[in-house]
Image (cartoon, rainbow, N blue to C red):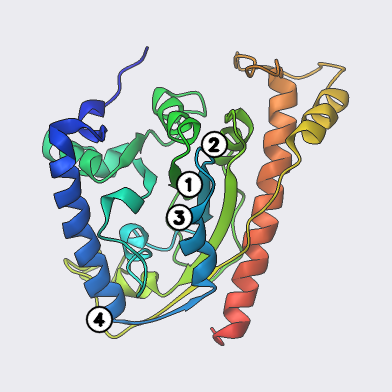
């Protein structure tokens, strides 16, 4: 078992859940203030997210994916009116960059209480904390990821997605409900280079935020796995030593094929939503 940063602080039972409830309450209130009070926010199809967060079948995991426009996309994107952003019971788990959110003990403790899982960028899909993310899905939880892997504030098409999100979809014992979300405006609330070439010390106000929530994406994993095996039977691929998936026994070549296929489909759906967002709000 590899090292997991302050995993104990992220457990629901830690000190009766009180520290987590307080952190989620404070962060949720901050998100509500910035997103719903200090800026103008429009949300398309919010009921799709609200229904899945509150009423999806017990044990069925939810995986939301979105573009990444600023360092404050999460938690601000959950601060729109009507969303229970201050209730720890409905709070998401999210993959967070270890070098930013877990760079010291205080940050690590607070972000752990806020249901964040540290990820080493470039550490691969089989790093220890990816297994922790998989455990969230195994227990029917809600996990959010930014599959592009880094912030991009340019008005540009969705970039090639990293394989981490696709690997979670394939490896989860119960296939998660996958819900795409596209937003714009957070890059103006927290621009990367507006304050002496750096981010401002506090979020900016009087900006327009647009959030478009899509419809769930269905993946026929049994068929995809059969296609992956058939397409990679020749085995002429340099390997990195990945373990076979359980219980399917997919080898590394088949994993690469299916991760690419799922990532490409996710990117296509997200790009369609981005274009819809641009047209709907004349961006």
Residue 37 circle label: 4
* Sequence order check, earlier mark of 1 and 4: 4
Residue 107 circle label: none
Q: Nearer the viewer, residue 250 or 185?
A: 250
Q: Which residue is mark 2?
A: 164
Kindly identify the residue that appears in the image at 30 percent across and 61 percent down. Answer: 85
Disc 3/disc 4 C-alpha distance (Å): 23 Å
SS state under label 2:
helix
Q: Comparing marks 3 and 2, which lies closer to the viewer?
A: 3
* Sequence order check, earlier mark of 1 and 2: 1
Q: Nearer the viewer, residue 188 or 166?
A: 166
Q: Which residue is mark 3?
A: 53
* Sequence order check, earlier mark of 3 and 4: 4
Residue 193 appears at what percent x and percent y?
30, 67
Disc 3/disc 2 C-alpha distance (Å): 22 Å
Q: Which residue is mark 1?
A: 149
Disc 1/disc 3 C-alpha distance (Å): 24 Å
Label 2: few (<14), some or many (≥20) within 10 Å? some
């Amino acid at each position: 078992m590899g090292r997991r940063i302050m995993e104990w602080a992220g457990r629901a039972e830690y000190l009766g859940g009180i520290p987590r409830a307080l952190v989620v309450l404070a962060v949720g209130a901050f998100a509500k203030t910035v997103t719903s009070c200090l800026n103008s926010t429009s949300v398309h199809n919010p009921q799709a997210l609200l229904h899945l967060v509150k009423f999806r079948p017990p044990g069925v995991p939810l995986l939301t994916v979105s573009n990444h426009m600023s360092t404050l996309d999460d938690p601000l994107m959950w601060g729109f009116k009507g969303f229970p952003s201050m209730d720890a019971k409905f709070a998401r788990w999210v993959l967070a960059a270890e070098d930013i959110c877990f760079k010291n003990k205080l940050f690590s403790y607070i972000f752990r209480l806020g249901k964040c899982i540290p990820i080493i960028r470039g550490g691969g899909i089989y790093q220890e904390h990816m297994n922790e993310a998989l455990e969230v899905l195994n227990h029917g939880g809600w996990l959010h990821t930014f599959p592009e892997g880094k912030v991009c504030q340019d008005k540009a098409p969705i970039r090639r997605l990293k394989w981490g999100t696709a690997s979670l979809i394939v490896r989860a014992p119960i296939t998660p409900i996958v819900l795409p979300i596209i937003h714009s405006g957070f890059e103006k609330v927290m621009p990367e280079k507006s304050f002496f070439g750096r981010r401002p010390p506090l979020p900016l106000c009087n900006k327009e935020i647009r959030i478009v929530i899509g419809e769930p994406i269905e993946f026929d994993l049994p068929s995809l796995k059969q296609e992956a095996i058939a397409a990679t039977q020749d085995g002429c691929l340099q390997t990195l030593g990945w373990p076979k998936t359980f219980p399917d026994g997919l080898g590394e070549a088949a994993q690469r094929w299916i991760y690419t296929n799922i990532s490409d489909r996710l990117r296509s759906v997200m790009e369609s939503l981005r274009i819809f967002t641009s047209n709907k709000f004349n961006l």
